[in-house]
Amino acid sequence: MITKHGGVVINEVEVEPLSEYVIEFLTAQKKESPFLDFKYVIPVDKDSDFPELAKDMFAFSNYGGGWILVGWEEHKKNQFVPVGLPEEYNLEPAVLQQKFESLSSEPLALGYTEFTKDFTSVFLKSKDDFKIKIGSISQRFAIIFVPPSYSFLTPKKDGKYLIQGKERIVFKQGDLFYRRGSQSIKPSNHEIQLIKKRIEKENYRISFLSGEPDEIEEKIYSNIFEFINFPKFVYSAEKRDYDNASVKMLLKQEGVFPEFYFKFKEWNKRIVTFENLFDNSNPYRKLVNADTIIKEPIWDWIKDDIKNPIIVEILNRELRHHAIGKHLYIYDKRTRLYYPTETDSRQEKWRSRYRNTTVTVAAKMYAEQLQRSIYWHTAFFPEILQINDKFYLRILPTFLITEDGKKPISDFLTGTIITRLSYDKYNSSYLNNILFWIHQLGESKDIAIKDYITISSKPVQLKSSLGIIFDIPSSEFKLDISEEDDPIDDENGEIDEF
């Protein structure tokens, strides 16, 4: 029997909920089930039928978690086929998160990622009953992971929208939903008892460490880091008539690095940024018409439902821009950050919780599945979260496979390689992986992005009454990220200890 430790178990393999392995497993399904739904697009616009989707999310979470595949259409009753996302479809994960939390009684950290995949031998029937084959053209899709709740998850307000001018009420405040087959329904008394038992088990296994949980005080390190300094103002102005290539060239001439990853968002034909556009020496000022510059308090934007996602996106851009400046590569397809290598392996120094050490961040290996050599890289997803009035950086460690030490590759076989790497290291080094990447971004200090953003290098700590009775105290428990844990001597020839 496999016990869950924070990932999910698919075919007796424990993996991250949005890993390639999970995506391959789910995209092979054709029907909806208690843990899977299919959608064509995710509606998040104002007055959209988002409450219909939220109802499914409440049901999934109370059931024990589930996924929603996006980019599928129903061919016949409960038979879904992949058609891909519309070309104009663009969903910011922060918008989805905010939209759901505006309805939910408790915060729920949704997972969202987009991926491309080739589907062959898929047939659709047209209105004239002719079969149309979808070839092996790569299509864009998305997937949402709805994690299990740790309490009864219910709406905090009514979920309603207009359809053909009439108001449809999908749920009322306090309604409880559960998955029965492929339906999201109000649970029976028996199903309510099942939810209670699942919640007890989820809370009982809240610790990520191995052992026998008991009702004792336990300190838990999270993978989120609080913003301790935040931009006070937002600057916006009309963008001058520059295309992206011209913007890159201009920023490069001004000494901006990296000039190819912009620290601004284009919105309503304006550039929105935290850079001071009133400063004549600021290179971003050259991108706008100076007489249209506006300076506004950032909280005016944060409190605005339409403008809030723009702030979150710019924060994400600032963080990624900062990371690239630390010589990390960015894989745009999944927004993963990683170190490239031009040799058979690459090591990076860092100051761990216990001493200075060396970490292997990339290495060449022979993959039997591919019958050739490839490179594995430790990597991470950085994501900005807003919880109430506070902002946090969330670090999600993972692995990435490249062809030559630089160029990422992604398909089912490479997904199985990542799954095995993740399975071997998930429990033993998860915390140190997180702390390693925070160290790299902040160089052993808090992460400072210019003078307007500072992110704490210390993870948010939680206290739970459900811990491990014979556990080693957190202060004494050692987790190592690296297989090679060679200490680095300081100038006095001694090993630095924390």
Image: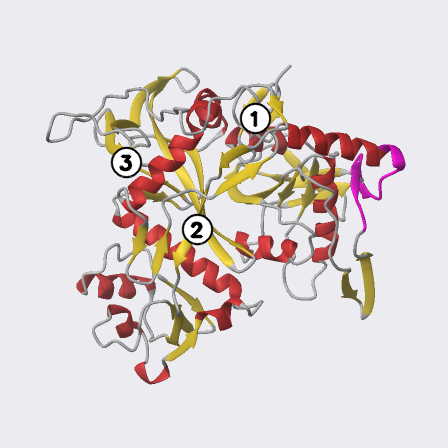
Between label 3 and label 2, give the one nearer the viewer.
Answer: 2
Where is residue 327, by image quadrant?
top left
Residue at image location 18% in from the left, 64% down from the top: 253
Q: Which residue is mark 3?
A: 340
* Amino acid at pointer 3: Pro
Q: For the residue labelled by badge 3, is the local secondary structure a helix, a strand or a loop?
A: loop
Residue 115 placement (x, y as % from top left): 51, 41
Where is residue 119, by image quadrant?
top right
Task: Give the answer, above or below, for where 295 lies relative to 492.
Answer: below
Q: For the residue labelled by badge 2, is the local secondary structure a helix, a strand or a loop?
A: strand
Residue at image location 74% in from the left, 36% down from the top: 63
Q: For the residue labelled by badge 1, is the local secondary structure a helix, a strand or a loop?
A: loop
Give, as a single range, the part of the protein colored magenta: 175-190
Where is residue 378, by image quadrant?
top left
- Quarter of the rendering occupied by the C terminus: top left
Task: Give the answer, above or below, for where 369 lies relative to 465.
Answer: above
Among the two numbered marks 2 and 1 on one chain, the one whose residue lies closer to the N terminus: 1
Residue 262 relative to residue 419: left or right: left
